[in-house]
Image: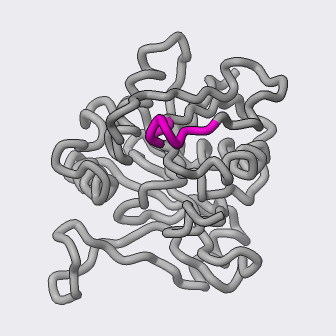
Amino acid sequence: MDKIVPIIVPLYYSYHLVERFIKSVELEKESEYCILFLDNTPKEDRKVISYLSEEKPIHKITVINWSDTENLLFTKSVNTLFKGVAGSDIDFDEFVVMNPDCFPLTENWITEMRKCLRLDKRIATVGSIQYSEEGKRFKNIWHCGCSWKSKNEHKCHPLDWKHINVREVVDYMLQNKKSIQVDGNTGTGIMFDRKIFEELNGLDDKKYPHYSSDADYCLRATNNGYIHLCSYVEMFHNPGKSVLK
């Protein structure tokens, strides 16, 4: 029997998305998983997530109110949640990093991503096809993995990359249930290999506390001989609007 898959989710002023997020995660029917939220919302604004009051196994969904004073931001939140689950009695080989504004659309999406991750021992991360507008699933492709920008392309950051959003590529992946090799994957909707993550000492939360830690990790993995895939799993990711109600 396969081991459980932890899903780690930094949470910040996104309570209104949690119920929908959990219901989208529940499209997974084959693989066992647990969801771990780390709540970075300031104590005075923190809310009880009512959806969690329903009868569910205690290990299935957990909210960690980590700090009353410090926002750990994305990178340290991921590392903190990973260390917490790695130090627990949960036995796992891979884990998923999500944001609460990213909703899986594919049935048994964890199982499908896991199949891709296990195609080769060199695979460090597996990403997903993500759409940027709800209801326009087959039109507005935000990305299906990323490629590094060349030297002659405008860069906002040395680790900047561009999204791969070619319609033909996505059609091929969906029709054939085939993954494609990419240079890296973005910070949400990613499955990580645990051993490789530990070998590379996780995300760099000192140099990249909030942005670009995903790019840095993928580049470090590549430099150490590992590769990255984008899977045929589909998700709706509403970037930049997670605090809107």
Q: Quadrant of residue 76?
A: top left
- Describe residue 197's horizontal placement relative to residue 177 as left or right: left
Of residues 191 and 229, the one drawn nearer to the viewer in this rendering: 191
In reply to whether residue 46 is colored magenta, the answer given is yes
Q: Is residue 2 visible?
A: yes
> Picture coordinates of residue 128 (x, y %)?
56, 60
Position of residue 104 in the picture relative to residue 114 (left or right)? right
Report x, y in % for residue 210: 31, 53
Q: Nearer the viewer, residue 150 or 98?
A: 98
Which residue does the image show at 56% across and 32% down from the upper left? 36
Foreground: 48 or 173? 48
Question: What residue lies at 42% left-to-right and 60% top-to-bottom?
Answer: 185
x%, y% of residue 118? 53, 41
Q: How did the renderer colour the structure?
A: one colour
Instruction: Give the residues drawn in magenta, as a range.
Output: 39-47
Q: Quadrant of the C terminus?
A: bottom right
